[in-house]
Amino acid sequence: MENKNYLYQQELLDYYRHPRNKGKIDSANFSSGVFNPSCGDNVILHGIIQNNKVIDIKFDGSGCVISQASSSMFTEKIKNKTIDELEKISVDDILSMVKIPLGPTRLRCALLVYEALKSGIESYKKNAQAR
């Protein structure tokens, strides 16, 4: 298992060093951020939803390898998903994506993007109802 953990750590480092979908979307119709006061990490999601589907998603923020790499991985995973599909994503889905054991502190880092998504979708749905 040690060799597999090494490979998974290398994958995380690649996502950290070469993030996918990092940046902002000026025309986003939802944005949501989460800050972890215990370590200072933060993740902000910017997305465009059309016809109930995420057509573009980017993240911004700063922090450790876990928070930033999981954000990069997660944005790849959720692009082109419907709101219904996004609402079914669980903590276990995030953990299976990260693929290494995480203690309580690192778990929180990995879940920042998940929390930002949940908050962003909730906000998007409220705004859509108000229109």
Image (spheres, rainbow, N blue to C red):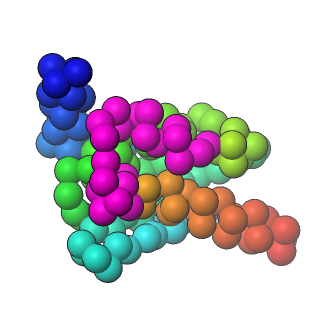
Q: What stretch is highlighted in magenta?
A: 89-110
Q: Is residue 19 left or right of residue 47?
A: left
- The verdict on residue 100 being magenta is yes
Q: Position of residue 38 (x, y in %)?
A: 28, 76
Q: Residue 115 location, x and y as percent?
A: 52, 61
Position of the N terminus, as image quadrant, is top left
Q: Quadrant of the C terminus?
A: bottom right
In the picture provided, is 21 more to the left or to the right than 90? left
**Which residue lies at the image location 53% right of the left edge and 47% below the top edge?**
91
**Where, by quadrant of the figure, is residue 52 drawn?**
top right
Residue 54 at x, y = what percent?
A: 61, 44
Quadrant location of residue 81?
Answer: top right
* Residue 109 visible in rendering: no
Give the percent coordinates (x, y) of residue 32: 51, 68
Q: Is residue 14 left or right of residue 77?
A: left
User: Please, what is the dominant secondary structure of the magenta stretch?
Assistant: helix
Give me the residue at 16% from left, 24% from top.
Answer: 2
Identify which residue is drawn at 59% across, 45% down: 90
Using the image, determine if residue 121 lies above or below residue 39.
above
